[in-house]
Image (cartoon, grey):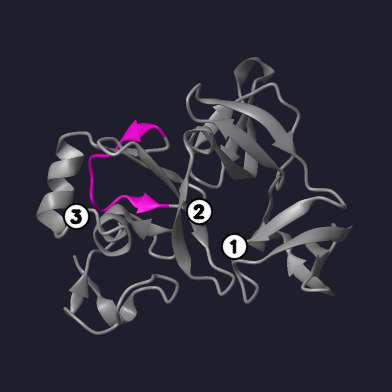
Amino acid sequence: MHLKRQKAPKNWPIYRKGTKYIVRPRFDTSRGIPILIVLRDMLKVAQNRKEVKRALYERNILLNNYPLTDEKTNILLFDVITIVPSKKNYRLGLTEKGKIRIEEINEKEANRKIAKIINKTLLKGKRMQLNLSDGRNFISDIKCSTNDSVLINLKERKIEKCLPLKESVSLFVFAGKHSGKKGIIKKINSEKKTVEVEMDEKIISILIKQLMVIE
């Protein structure tokens, strides 16, 4: 089923006038943007859907170091896209106005990404599974709490370190009216599930569920 262009999320950087329909992502339209739109409309490395599907079939497009096979796959915040023939790497981010953007990064940066811990699961043998905002699950001995972030080594497919949610650390807002902005945590209110953030020379209260810790 297609998605009407006018109904596409407002943070998608697409023309609102044009063909009536646009590709519908494989899952939740509010999370990320399809790789077809990224390659054809944002990076302009393909002219049409047929070229994108051919590139995927030939395993020329990697997502977080894995070959992509479906042009409807959602690209999520901080995901890394690699164009194999050109050896170019890109990361999905947000502008300060909350619009999705793609920025080119170097090979070293392309081997790592940050994700937020949305919850944890205790498995048999007292092993802890960390369930992340990008859909990944990791069994790790690293001590982390829900709402902390982790730095993932994409090449080795493991968590390198925990980025705890605490005062004085940097954060990135990915939802709400401040989406796309960065700040410094000044105070955490666990009861209200909010943090006071220094941003644009002001102190602003933001819901913990709308932000993630970054380096």
Where does the image place residue 84, in percent across and percent down from the top left? 29, 35
Asked if the stretch drawn in magenta spans residue 73, the answer is yes
Label pair 2/1, CB-CB below 8 angstroms: yes
| Residue shown at 10% from the left, 53% from the top | 50
Give the class, few, some or many, for how many residues have Cα within 10 Å of label 2's Cα (few <14, many ≥20): many
Say left or right for 23 vs 121: left
**Residue 77 disc label:** 2
Q: Which residues are magenta?
A: 65-75
Q: Is 197 located above or below residue 70 in the figure?
A: below
- Label 3 to label 2: alpha-carbon separation: 22 Å
Where does the image place residue 169, in percent across and percent down from the top left? 81, 50
Say left or right for 49 vs 124: left
Give the class, few, some or many, for how many residues have Cα within 10 Å of label 3's Cα (few <14, many ≥20): some
| Residue shown at 80% from the left, 59% from the top | 184
Residue extending furthest top? Answer: 125
User: Residue 192: which quarter of the image?
Assistant: bottom right
